[in-house]
Image: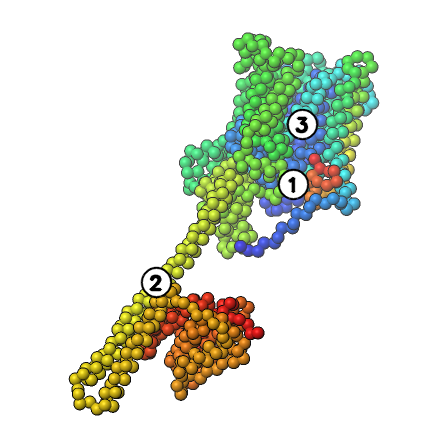
C-alpha cells in the first residue's frame, strides 16, 4: 500500500514539476518564443479547468447516485463551445478590444465603467467561488485520507487532515502568487500558469482515461461486457428527471460563460481569436473523453466495493481495491491536478477582480489625491493582488474548515454554478442588446443574487445555519408563500431547479424591465454601441478630449502602473505614430483612449478611467458633456458671428466718422482760409477804390488822362467786387433751389463753343482738343446758359491751374445708354486724393498760393448740374485733372 | 496634423458575394445551427419512457448521447475549417440572409 509519505513525495514532485513547467514557459515567453505556448491546443487544454476535482471525482459519484444525469454538466459547455459563432466569439473579441481583465470588468465596462456593478459582480463571484475552492481542498484532503486509511475514508470531517487542506491551500496560494502576479497587466497572458494548466489538463485526462480503460478492459472484460454489466446494475433502468436534465444543461452552459475562472482562460488569456476555431470542437471532444468512462467506473465501483463506500471516491478506491497502486497514484494525481488548476486560476481571476474593483478604488480614495500621488503604484497593485490571492485561498480554506465538510459540500458545485450564472442576463444583455442599462443590470443582479442566496445558498449550508428548519418549513414569520424552497407556494420542484427558475426569471425580467424603463448615461450608450457592434467598430471608445491633459503627468502616472520601461515605450510609440518629435505624444483623444485601455489591462476599466480622468482634470467626456459643449460652442459661434457683424458695422461707421471728421476739419480750415481770402479779395478792390477815389477827390491838378485811368481802375475793381458778390449770390440761390431754368434746345458743340469763347483763353493759354463730330451729334434740351456756365468754369479752371509745360485740355464726349458724358481732361498734375473730397465744396481752393476766384466755381457747377438733373464728378486715373459732366437722358436728345 | 491615410470607405453592404465568400457564409450559418441541433438531439432522451418496462437501457442511452456528441464534434471540426478565417469586410450580420 502506498504510504502517505510516498504520496506526499509524489505530490511535492508533481508540484515541483508544475513549477518547472511554469518557469520554463515564462522564460520562453520572455525570450519571445511563444509560438508553441500560444497554440490552439494549449488554449483548448487550458479551458479544461472547467473540469475540477468536483467533476473528476464527483461525476462518478453523481453517476452512481443519479445515473446519466452527470453528463448534463458537460453538455452545457459543449453546446456553448460548439455555438461559439453565437456568443463566445463576440465575447472574446470584446475582451480583446476592450482589454477586459475579468468578468466584473467586462460588465462594469459595458455599463458605463460603473464600479458599483464591478463590486457587485466581484462579491457575487467571491461568494460563489469560495465554497468551490473549499470543495477542491476537501477533495484533496479526502483523497489523501483514502490512502492513509486504506480506502475507507467514510468520514470526511475535517480532523487531522485539516492540516493537509491547510498546507495544500498554502502551496497553491504560493504558486498562484509566484506565477499569477508576475506581470501587472492582468490582460497579458500568464504564460506559465496557462502552460501549467494545460499540462494538468493532460494529466487529469490521462488519469481518468487510464482508470476507465482499466475498468472496462481490465475488470469488465471489454466494451460489450461492460455495457451488459451497466444494464444489469442498479443504474440499468433509464430514469432521469427531465427538469433537472434540461435545467442542469442550461445551468452548466450559463456557468461556463460566467464562472470567473473560465472567463479568465476563455477571454482574458485568449491570445488569438482563431484559437477559438479549434477549441470550438476540441473542447467538446475533451469533455467527451472526460465523461466517457464515468458510468462504467461507477457501475464497477458499486459492484466491487462494499455498500456504503463513498462513490465520490470510486476513481481512487476501485484501483486501490484491485491492488493497482500505481494507477491509483495516477488517479490521485489527476484529482490533485484538477483541484490545483481550479484553485490557481480561480484565485487569479478573483484576485484580479478584488484588487481592481475593491482594493484599488479604496486605496485610491484613502490616499486622497489618487493617481497623482507620488510613488510607484505598481507595487501597490501587485501587493493588492497578492494579498487578494492569499485572501481568496484562505477564505476557501476557512469555509472548508468551518462548514465541516461532508455532504453539504457535495452539492455546492451546482449551488455555486447557480450563483455565478446570475451574471448571465447582464452579460449577454450587455453584448447583444444596446438597450441594456446599468440600472437594469444592477437591479437584475441584485434580484437574482438575493433570490439565489435565499432559496439555494442559505438552505444549502445547512439548517443549522442562517435559516432555521422552521423557516424552511413554514417560511419566514410564518408566511408560507415565502418558503425558501417553495416560493409563491409552488411546491414539489427540485430545490436546485426551483432556485434557478425563480432567480433567473426574476433576474432577467427585472433586468429587462428596469433597462427599458431607465435611461442610460451617454457613456453607457457609447460603451453599449462599442460592445454590441464590436465587429463593426474600430476598437476603443473615443472618450477623452485631448489638449487638456498634461502628457507629462500622464507619463508619470503610466510609469507607476505600467513600469517605467513599458510606459516609455508606449509613449514613444504613440509619439512616433503621431509624428511628434521626442517622447511625449500630444494628448489626443486617440492617445488617451489607447492609454486608458492599456491601464485598464492592469487596474481595470473603471479605475483606469478614473485615473486618466484625474490627470486630464476631470475632463471625462461623456457624450452628454460633448453635447453640452457642442451646444455651448454653437451658441458662442452664433454670438461671435453677431459680434463680428456688429463690430464690422462699427468699424465701418467709425471709418465713415473718421472720414467725415477729416472732411470737417479740412472744411473748417478751408473756411478760415476762405474768410481770410474773401476779406482779402473784398479788401483789395475796396482799398484801391478808396485810395483812387481819395486821389480823385483831393488832387485837383490831375491831368485828364490820369483821372480817367484812376476812374477806370475804380470801375474795374467795383466790377470785380460785383462779380464776387454775384457768385456768392448765385450759389446761395442755387443752393436754396430758387433758380428758374430756362430750357432750350441746342447742340452740345454750340454750348462748348460759347463756353470756350467766354473763357477767353489768351495766347499761350491752354490748347483745346475737341471732337467736333461727337459734339455735333449730341442735342440738348436744357438750360443752355447754365450748362455753358459750368463748361466755362471747367475750361477756365484748366487754363488757370494746368501746370504742364504745354497745357492741353481734351474734351471727350461719350454717349452711353441713358446718359451723355462730357469729360474735361488736362495734362496737369491732377488733384491729390485728399483734395478730391472737397473740391466741390464751397470756398474750396486747391492751392492756397494760386490766386484766382473765391473757390466757388466748382461748388456752383455742382449745384447747377444737380439742378439740371445730371452731375459733375472728379474722374480719377486720367493722367491729369479730369472732370466728368454727366447729362441725364432727357437733357440729351439723340441727333436726328 | 499629419496626413493620415484615408480609411477605406465603408462600402454599402454587398448584395451578391463571390462564390467562395457565399459558401463561407453558409458554412457559418451551419455552424450557428449546430448547437441548436445538439440541444435538440440531447433533449430527445427526455421523451423516452422512464423507469418502466420498455424503457431503453442505460447502455443504449449512453451510446446515443455519446454518438450525438461524436457527431457534433466531428461536424464542428469540419465546419471550423470551412467557415474560414473570420473577418473579411462586412463579415458579420449582413448579407444574403446571413447574420444573427
Asked if labels 3 and 1 touch by Cβ distance under 8 angstroms, the answer is no
A701 is higher (above) or lower (below) than A366: below
Counting other residues with Cα less than 10 Å from the Cα at mark 1, is it few (<14), some (14-19), or many (20 or more)? Answer: some
Position of the C terminus of chain A by quadrant: bottom right
Q: CA distance from mark 3 to mark 2?
A: 91 Å
Q: Earlier in the sequence, mark 2 or mark 1?
A: 1
Counting other residues with Cα less than 10 Å from the Cα at mark 2, is it few (<14), some (14-19), or many (20 or more)? Answer: few
- From the image, state whether disc 3 or disc 2 is nearer to you: 2
Instruction: Tell me: A465 left or right of A230.
Output: left
> Residue beneath label 1, please?
A535
Q: CA distance from mark 2 to mark 1?
A: 71 Å
Question: Residue B91's x, y, as percent?
Answer: 70, 42
Q: Earlier in the sequence, mark 1 or mark 3?
A: 3
A51 is higher (above) or lower (below) than B12: above
> Residue beneath label 3, please?
A253
> Residue beneath label 2, please?
A661
A87 or A430, nearer to the observer? A430
Position of the N terminus of chain A by quadrant: top right
Amino acid at each position: 500500500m502506498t504510504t502517505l509519505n510516498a504520496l506526499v513525495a509524489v505530490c511535492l514532485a508533481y508540484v515541483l514539476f508544475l513549477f518547472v513547467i511554469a518557469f520554463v514557459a515564462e522564460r520562453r515567453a520572455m525570450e519571445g518564443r511563444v509560438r508553441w505556448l500560444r497554440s490552439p491546443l494549449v488554449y483548448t487544454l487550458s479551458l479544461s479547468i472547467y473540469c475540477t476535482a468536483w467533476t473528476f471525482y464527483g461525476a462518478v459519484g453523481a453517476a452512481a447516485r443519479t445515473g446519466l444525469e452527470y453528463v448534463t454538466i458537460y453538455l452545457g459547455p459543449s453546446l456553448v463551445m460548439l455555438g461559439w459563432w453565437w456568443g463566445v466569439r463576440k465575447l472574446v473579441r470584446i475582451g480583446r478590444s476592450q482589454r477586459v481583465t475579468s468578468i466584473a470588468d467586462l460588465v462594469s465596462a459595458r455599463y458605463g465603467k460603473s464600479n458599483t456593478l464591478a463590486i457587485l459582480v466581484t462579491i457575487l463571484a467571491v461568494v460563489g467561488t469560495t465554497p468551490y475552492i473549499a470543495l477542491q481542498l476537501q477533495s484533496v484532503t479526502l483523497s489523501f485520507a483514502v490512502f492513509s486509511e486504506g480506502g475507507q475514508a467514510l468520514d470526511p470531517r475535517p480532523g487531522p487532515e485539516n492540516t493537509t487542506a491547510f498546507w495544500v491551500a498554502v502551496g497553491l496560494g504560493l504558486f498562484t502568487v509566484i506565477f499569477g502576479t508576475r506581470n501587472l497587466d492582468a490582460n497579458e497572458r500568464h504564460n506559465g500558469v496557462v502552460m501549467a494548466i494545460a499540462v494538468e489538463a493532460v494529466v487529469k485526462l490521462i488519469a481518468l482515461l487510464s482508470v476507465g480503460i482499466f475498468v472496462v478492459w481490465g475488470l469488465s472484460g471489454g466494451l460489450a461486457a461492460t455495457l451488459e454489466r451497466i444494464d444489469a446494475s442498479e443504474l440499468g433502468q433509464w430514469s432521469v428527471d427531465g427538469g433537472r436534465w434540461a435545467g442542469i444543461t442550461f445551468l452548466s452552459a450559463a456557468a461556463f460563460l460566467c464562472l470567473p475562472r473560465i472567463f479568465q482562460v476563455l477571454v482574458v488569456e485568449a491570445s488569438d481569436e482563431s484559437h477559438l476555431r479549434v477549441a470550438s470542437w476540441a473542447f467538446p471532444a475533451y469533455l467527451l473523453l472526460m465523461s466517457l468512462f464515468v458510468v462504467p467506473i461507477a457501475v464497477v465501483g458499486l459492484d466491487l466495493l462494499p455498500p456504503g463506500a463513498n462513490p465520490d471516491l470510486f476513481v481512487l478506491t476501485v484501483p486501490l481495491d484491485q491492488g493497482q497502486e500505481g494507477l491509483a497514484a495516477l488517479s490521485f494525481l489527476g484529482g490533485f491536478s484538477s483541484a490545483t488548476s481550479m484553485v490557481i486560476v480561480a484565485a487569479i481571476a478573483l484576485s484580479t477582480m478584488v484588487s481592481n474593483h475593491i482594493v484599488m478604488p479604496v486605496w485610491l480614495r484613502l490616499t486622497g489625491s489618487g493617481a497623482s500621488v507620488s510613488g510607484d503604484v505598481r507595487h501597490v497593485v501587485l501587493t493588492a493582488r497578492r494579498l487578494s490571492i492569499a485572501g481568496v485561498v484562505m477564505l476557501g480554506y476557512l469555509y472548508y474548515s468551518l462548514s465541516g465538510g461532508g455532504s453539504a459540500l457535495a452539492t455546492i458545485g451546482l449551488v455555486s454554478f447557480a450563483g455565478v450564472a446570475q451574471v448571465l442576463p447582464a452579460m449577454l444583455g450587455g453584448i447583444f442588446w444596446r438597450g441594456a442599462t446599468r440600472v437594469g443590470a444592477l437591479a437584475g443582479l441584485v434580484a437574482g443574487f438575493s433570490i439565489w442566496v435565499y432559496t439555494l445558498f442559505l438552505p444549502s449550508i445547512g439548517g443549522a445555519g442562517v435559516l432555521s428548519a422552521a423557516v424552511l418549513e413554514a417560511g419566514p414569520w410564518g408566511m408560507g408563500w415565502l418558503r425558501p424552497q417553495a416560493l409563491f407556494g409552488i411546491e414539489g420542484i427540485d430545490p436546485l431547479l426551483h432556485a434557478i427558475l425563480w432567480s433567473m426569471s426574476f433576474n432577467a425580467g427585472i433586468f429587462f424591465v428596469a433597462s427599458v424603463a431607465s435611461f442610460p448615461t451617454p457613456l453607457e450608450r457609447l460603451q453599449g454601441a462599442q460592445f454590441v457592434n464590436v465587429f463593426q467598430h474600430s476598437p476603443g471608445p473615443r472618450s477623452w478630449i485631448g489638449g487638456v491633459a498634461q502628457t507629462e503627468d500622464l507619463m508619470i502616472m503610466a510609469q507607476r502602473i505600467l513600469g517605467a520601461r513599458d510606459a516609455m515605450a508606449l509613449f514613444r510609440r504613440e509619439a512616433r505614430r503621431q509624428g511628434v518629435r521626442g517622447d511625449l505624444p500630444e494628448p489626443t483623444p486617440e492617445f488617451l483612449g489607447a492609454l486608458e485601455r492599456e491601464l485598464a489591462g492592469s487596474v481595470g476599466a473603471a479605475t483606469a478611467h478614473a485615473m486618466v480622468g484625474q490627470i486630464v482634470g476631470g475632463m471625462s467626456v461623456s457624450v452628454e458633456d460633448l453635447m453640452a459643449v457642442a451646444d455651448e460652442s454653437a451658441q458662442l459661434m452664433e454670438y461671435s458671428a453677431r459680434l463680428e457683424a456688429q463690430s464690422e458695422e462699427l468699424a465701418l461707421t467709425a471709418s465713415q466718422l473718421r472720414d467725415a471728421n477729416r472732411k470737417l476739419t479740412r472744411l473748417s480750415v478751408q473756411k478760415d482760409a476762405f474768410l481770410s481770402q474773401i476779406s482779402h479779395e473784398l479788401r483789395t478792390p475796396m482799398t484801391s477804390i478808396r485810395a483812387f477815389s481819395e486821389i480823385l477827390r483831393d488832387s485837383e491838378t490831375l491831368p485828364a488822362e490820369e483821372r480817367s485811368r484812376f476812374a477806370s481802375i475804380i470801375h474795374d475793381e467795383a466790377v470785380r467786387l460785383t462779380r464776387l458778390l454775384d457768385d456768392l449770390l448765385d450759389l446761395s440761390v442755387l443752393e436754396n433751389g430758387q433758380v428758374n431754368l430756362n430750357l432750350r434746345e441746342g447742340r452740345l458743340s454750340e454750348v462748348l463753343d460759347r463756353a470756350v469763347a467766354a473763357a477767353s483763353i489768351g495766347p499761350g493759354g491752354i490748347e483745346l482738343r475737341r471732337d467736333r463730330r461727337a459734339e455735333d451729334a449730341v442735342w440738348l434740351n436744357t438750360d443752355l446758359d447754365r450748362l455753358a456756365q459750368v463748361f466755362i468754369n471747367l475750361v477756365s479752371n484748366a487754363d488757370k491751374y494746368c501746370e504742364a509745360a504745354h497745357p492741353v485740355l481734351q474734351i471727350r464726349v461719350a454717349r452711353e445708354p441713358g446718359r451723355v458724358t462730357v469729360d474735361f481732361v488736362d495734362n496737369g498734375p491732377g488733384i491729390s486724393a485728399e483734395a478730391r473730397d472737397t473740391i466741390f465744396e464751397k470756398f474750396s481752393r486747391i492751392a492756397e498760393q494760386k490766386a484766382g476766384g473765391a473757390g466757388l466755381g466748382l461748388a456752383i457747377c455742382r449745384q447747377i448740374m444737380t439742378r439740371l438733373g445730371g452731375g459733375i464728378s472728379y474722374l480719377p486715373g486720367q493722367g491729369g485733372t479730369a472732370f466728368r459732366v454727366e447729362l441725364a437722358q432727357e437733357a440729351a436728345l439723340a441727333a436726328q | 496634423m499629419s496626413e493620415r491615410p484615408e480609411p477605406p470607405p465603408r462600402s454599402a453592404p454587398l448584395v451578391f458575394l463571390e462564390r467562395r465568400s457565399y459558401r463561407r457564409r453558409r458554412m457559418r450559418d451551419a455552424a450557428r445551427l449546430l448547437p441548436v441541433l445538439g440541444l435538440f438531439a440531447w433533449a430527445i432522451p427526455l421523451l423516452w419512457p422512464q423507469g418502466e418496462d420498455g424503457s431503453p437501457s442505460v447502455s443504449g442511452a449512453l451510446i446515443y448521447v455519446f454518438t450525438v456528441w461524436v457527431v457534433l464534434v466531428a461536424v464542428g471540426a469540419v465546419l471550423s475549417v470551412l467557415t474560414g478565417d473570420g473577418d473579411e469586410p462586412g463579415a458579420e450580420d449582413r448579407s444574403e440572409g446571413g447574420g444573427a
